[in-house]
């Protein structure tokens, strides 16, 4: 694939806690030139980026990030605020405590609540694979599917390990036909991106361009 084709899969990401307005502008201007799928930015910058770049960019942001243990009510409020501010895509982190407690019904209900909050906008569900057993990953594939989310996503990029090809292959076996896959975390080269796309990803989260 060409660099231009690869860029169309990329959520070009800047989520560092110390990211400045100048950093975000550089990200957005590079994303516009490369025609990335979106920019993935901190919630506090969404309205400002939307105001400056308007329809030139597809804006993605994160909620419950990066640890996922905020209450469902807080995540719902975050999601509604993100959409109101101009985000067209939202990447949420599941509550890993609920996962470890085996309360997958609660996880499903939280995802469903956030999907209702964002409506027709895209919801991606980050399950943070580095902390999970295979059984938990499979259960979360079912949660994401049953709740009506648009994507399952491997990682925040802030955990102990990022995306793995074997996790994408596992997802493909267990998600529903309407759920897409996003890989993120440690994907830094065009070759890496191409490998993940070949095994089934339709989005790649990365802080570098191909």
Image (spheres, helix red, strand yellow):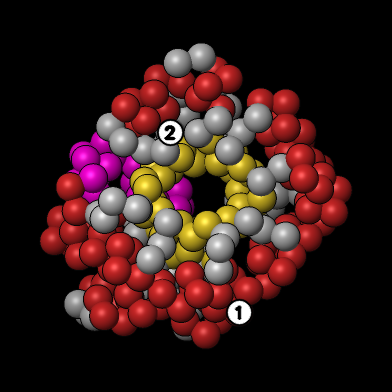
The answer to whether residue 94 of the structure is visible from this angle is yes
The percent coordinates of residue 8 (x first, y second) are 55, 30
- Label 2 to label 1, Cα distance in Å? 31 Å
| Picture residue at 61% right of the left edge, 48% below the top | 40
Question: From the viewer's perspective, is 67 left or right of 178?
Answer: right
Q: Quadrant of the N terminus?
A: top left
The percent coordinates of residue 168 (x first, y second) are 27, 42
Depth check, front residue: 167 or 122: 122
**Which callout, 2 or 1, points at the residue further toward the start of the chain?**
1
Question: Was residue 168 drawn as part of the magenta stretch in this picture?
Answer: yes
| Picture residue at 82% right of the left edge, 45% below the top | 53
- Circles 2 and 1, Cβ within 8 Å, touching? The answer is no
Depth check, front residue: 161 or 108: 108
Question: From the viewer's perspective, is 203 left or right of 77?
Answer: left
Question: Was residue 42 drawn as part of the magenta stretch in this picture?
Answer: no
| Picture residue at 36% right of the left edge, 46% below the top | 181
The percent coordinates of residue 49 (x first, y second) are 78, 51
Nearer the observer: mark 2 or 1; the answer is: 1
Q: Which mark is residue 187?
A: 2
Residue 209 picture quarter: top right
Q: Which residues make up the magenta segment? A: 154-172
Residue labelled with disc 1 = 77
């Amino acid at each position: 694939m060409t660099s231009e084709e690869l860029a169309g899969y990329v959520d070009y990401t800047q989520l560092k806690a110390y990211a400045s307005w100048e950093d975000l502008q550089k990200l957005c201007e590079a994303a516009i030139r490369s025609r990335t799928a979106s920019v993935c930015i901190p919630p506090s910058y969404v309205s400002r980026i939307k105001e400056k770049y308007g329809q030139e960019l597809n804006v993605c942001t994160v909620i419950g990030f990066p640890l996922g243990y905020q209450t469902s009510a807080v995540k719902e409020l975050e999601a509604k605020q993100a959409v109101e501010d101009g985000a067209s895509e939202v990447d949420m982190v599941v509550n890993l405590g609920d996962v470890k407690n085996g309360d997958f019904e609660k996880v499903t209900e939280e995802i469903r609540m956030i999907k209702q909050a964002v409506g027709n906008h895209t919801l991606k569900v980050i399950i943070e694979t580095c902390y999970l057993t295979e059984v938990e990953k499979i259960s979360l594939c079912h949660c994401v599917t049953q709740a009506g989310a648009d994507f399952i996503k491997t990682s925040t990029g802030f955990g102990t390990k990022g995306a793995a090809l074997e996790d994408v292959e596992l997802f493909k076996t267990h998600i529903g036909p309407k759920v897409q896959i996003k890989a993120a975390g440690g994907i830094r080269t065009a070759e890496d991106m191409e490998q993940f796309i070949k095994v089934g990803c339709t989005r790649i989260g990365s802080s570098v361009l191909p």
